Amino acid sequence: MNPNLYKKITASNLCLIAVLFLTAAYSLFESLRMHQSIESIITLWLLAVGMSVVTIKHLPPKETSILRHDIILSWIFLICANGTLLATAYMNDSLAMQISIFLIMGACMARFTNYQNVFKLLPAGAIFLILLPNSTYFNSLISYPLRLICSYLTCWTLKLCAVDVSCDGTILQLGAEKIAVTSACSGIAQLEAMFLIGWIIVMLVQKRLICQILHWLLLLPIVILLNSLRLTITLLLYLGIGEAAFGETIHTTLGYVMVIAVVTVFWACRSLIRVQEKAEVKK
């Protein structure tokens, strides 16, 4: 092993890594304790770990002094954490506690690294401490909007195919038949896995942070559009072969096809996100 590697591990960086390790361990324990979906836990936890590792790899190899604004940021986080605990009358007690712990984590990180690294690590911290322990709550929160969007997009697409269809909320009416777009049809079950796969693709094809963020933001619209197309195909099959279109074989096959299509389209969008690199100035 390269002996110079140890010289790059500063006291501040070790403390920061310790904070992240404790955060990751706590989030995993708390998520399991609250009986969240194991698949969702593993996917989101791996995503947050990957985001943390990428930031840690770019930490400065030398000890850097903590500036005044970093200390001020730490105190701001602590004050906000106390304020969050006082807001339990307006939100779920468990969610308020998780947000408060998240802010305390931010305060600790601000004492060991500069504010740029703190803000780069905050998304991973939010996944660890807010999203993971409350994934069931957030899934139920976004499930209806996703179902509503998919319902109207599917209705519009079916009309393009000359199908007599109308939409009332998340209920599609095909002739005399009423078909509900449920949570399983909204694409939310694949969303966590798509976020992880999308993040890996972004890390592979984009080098600059702004490009990575812009590319990743395309993922949700792509998932919604392709999931609506999957629903359209399912309902067209229903009009042709009846109830068999909702069978496990067709449902699973179309689900896998949608995942492959999302990955393919998302990968193809890499050339749309480009920021002109600055030319190197010759000395």
Image (tube, rainbow, N blue to C red):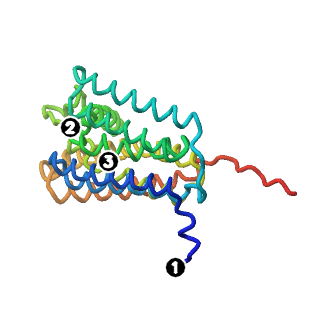
Looking at the image, which residue sits at the far bottom?
1
Left or right of residue 210: residue 172: left
Q: Are marks 3 and 2 in contact (CB under 8 Å)?
A: no
Mark identifier at residue 173: none
Relative to 225, is 83 above or below?
A: above
Q: Position of residue 19 (x, y in %)?
A: 39, 50
Q: Is residue 83 above or below residue 233?
A: above
Q: Position of residue 27 (x, y in %)?
A: 27, 49
User: Label 2, on which residue?
Assistant: 181
Q: Quadrant of residue 252?
A: bottom left
Mark 1: few, some, or many residues within 10 Å (few <14, many ≥20)? few
State the SS at label 1.
loop
Please identify, in this view, whether the residue under mark 3 or under mark 2 is nearer the observer.
3
Answer with mark 3 or mark 2, whichever residue precedes in sequence.
2
Q: CA distance from mark 3 to mark 2?
A: 16 Å
Q: CA distance from mark 1 to mark 2?
A: 56 Å
